[in-house]
Amino acid sequence: MTKINKKYKDRLFRMAFCEKKDLLELYNAMNGSSYSDPEELEIVTLDDVIYMGLKNDVAFLIDEVLNLWEHQSTWNPNMPLRGLFYFSDEYRKYIEKRHLNIYGSRRVMLPVPQYVVFYNGPENRPERSVLPLSQSFCHMNPEHAACIELKATVININRGYNETLMKQCKKLRDYAEFTGRVRDELKEASSLEEAVELAVDYCIRNDILADFLSSHRAEVCEVILTEYDEEMHIASEKEISREEGLLKGREEGIRALIMDNLEKQVPEDIIIQKLQRYFSLDKEKVTAYLSTFKKEYVSIYGQREKI
């Protein structure tokens, strides 16, 4: 694979929709509008802002609407919170650029925020859903109404979803087809690198993002490999957390059995038999657990009659 500049950090979605004309086509398709001049659109993406380890994909202004678009290949219910942070920085930049006075007696008017998340992960999700920030607020005191709200509209762009939108925006349809093709090739290819190369070749032959893939082949391959590495790392962390949770639960069960039996003055040989039977532990581990929790029992309850 051709080596490229390692400073290249853009994600695939951002690469595919970096041109104003492509953003405008997708915006029109999503909103039923008919803007024709790409120069009416002002890209305002904050390139130096990174949340959760990833750049935001794209932000732009058009007709006093501030649009934030994100792409996600793993389901993330915290996107509204991420959007809150990002919009705060965007508005700060907007106010500073226009020298607006937020301390004066005149109301400062701001562009309307719109937050869209394009999802194409493997989980079965509806074509369109809304994630409100208010769902993340604690409800211990229901009499207190939240003073802020932010909603992320999640659009499923996997193949077979939102077909009307796909028909109206070829670039989005091609993007969905290409990412789906990578997953198809992964089922048979010997490596991720091979799957990506095969998917790129297939799409170029079949006029799917053909110009884009031909011009940016090395960058696309590098970005996909990076993104899949991130997904696998996240999945690995989830599995580690799950295993740690299971281990913690198992140890809590062992502790409970030992403490309860010590309280009932059950002989140690019987406790050992129970631990071996209920938890499939060998004699060495049983002895270690019994010694550890027996010390804890004594420290809590004091020395009882010897068992």
Image: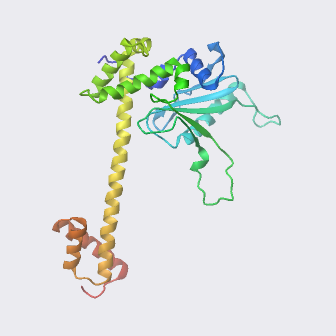
From what the image shows, is residue 184 above or below residue 147? above
Residue 255 position, x and y percent, is 32, 70
In-front residue for pair 89/209: 209
Q: Quadrant of residue 4?
A: top left
* Residue in the image at 33% along x and 55% along y: 244
Whether residue 250 can be seen here: yes
Residue at image x 75%, y 31%? 109
Counting from the top left corner in percent of width and height, residue 278 is at: 25, 68
User: Which residue is most to the bottom?
Assistant: 305
Residue nearest the viewer, comparing 76 with 53: 76
Q: Residue visible at 44% across and 16% down?
A: 209
Q: Could you tell me if residue 10 is visible in this image? A: no
Q: Position of residue 156 (x, y in %)?
A: 50, 33
Residue at far left of view? 283
The x and y percentages for residue 299 are 34, 77
Q: Left or right? Give the position of 307 relative to 168.
A: left
